[in-house]
Image (tube, rainbow, N blue to C red):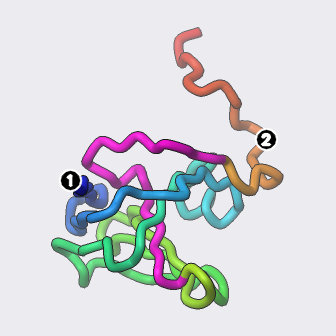
């Protein structure tokens, strides 16, 4: 049985479903991902492009070419980062999903941190530091 994952942007103008389990789960610390997410790192999982189906709001998705080969997609209403993909090369037929936009619970089998040499100096490596300590 194939799991179907549902997702949406913050304002729910864009909704989507994945007919494949996200793979290559990574937490990217590069400056482009940090700026695109407004956070210490961005968490993504990848699926074949044909496993992503936009259910609503396709016209609300804006594409931004952040480099010659990378396209980033976000909601034009609320600004939520949704997807990124390569426009050329080996993985051009895959799309990476911003995992924070998933509405269906997802627990990856494996995950990794990438571009850690670009990590911000203020991020605390402990998984869930208490705000009350």
Q: Quadrant of residue 59?
A: bottom left
Question: SS for tag 2?
Answer: loop
Going from N to C along the chain, the mark reached first, 2 or 1, is: 1
Residue drawn at 32 percent across, 52 percent down: 102
Q: Residue furthest front?
A: 1
Residue 79 within the segment the image draws in magenta: no
Q: Which residues are magenta?
A: 92-112
Mark 2 burial class by Cα count in 10 Å: few <14, some 14-19, many 20+: few
Residue drawn at 62 percent across, 88 percent down: 89
117 left or right of 105 in image: right
Question: SS for tag 1?
Answer: loop
Q: Position of residue 126 (x, y in %)?
A: 66, 25
Q: Position of residue 68 (x, y in %)?
A: 66, 89
The residue under label 1 is 1
Q: Nearer the viewer, residue 83 or 78?
A: 83
Q: Position of residue 79 (x, y in %)?
A: 39, 66
- Vertical placement of 81 versus 73: above or below? above
Q: Nearer the viewer, residue 101 or 79?
A: 101
Report the mark closest to the observer, 2 or 1: 1
The residue under label 2 is 121
Q: Position of residue 111 (x, y in %)?
A: 57, 46
- Vertical placement of 101 versus 84: above or below? above
26 left or right of 95 in image: right
Residue drawn at 35 percent across, 54 percent down: 101
- Vertical placement of 44 versus 68: above or below? above
How far apart marks 2 and 1 lie (CA) works out to 43 Å
Asked whether disc 2 touches disc 1, contact meaning CB atoms under 8 Å apart, the reply is no
Mark 1 burial class by Cα count in 10 Å: few <14, some 14-19, many 20+: few
Count of numbered labels shown in the rendering: 2
Residue 100 within the segment the image draws in magenta: yes
């Amino acid at each position: 049985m194939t799991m179907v994952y549902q997702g949406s942007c913050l304002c729910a103008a864009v909704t989507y479903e994945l007919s494949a389990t996200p793979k290559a789960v990574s937490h990217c610390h590069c400056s482009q991902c940090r700026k695109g997410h407004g956070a210490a790192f961005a968490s993504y999982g990848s699926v074949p492009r044909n496993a992503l189906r936009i259910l609503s709001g396709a016209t609300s998705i804006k594409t931004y070419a952040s480099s010659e080969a990378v396209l980033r997609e976000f909601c034009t209403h609320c600004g939520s980062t949704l997807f990124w993909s390569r426009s050329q090369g080996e993985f051009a037929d895959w799309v990476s999903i911003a995992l924070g936009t998933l509405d269906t619970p997802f627990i990856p089998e494996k995950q990794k941190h990438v571009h850690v040499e670009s990590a911000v100096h203020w991020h605390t490596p402990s998984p869930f530091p208490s705000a009350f300590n």
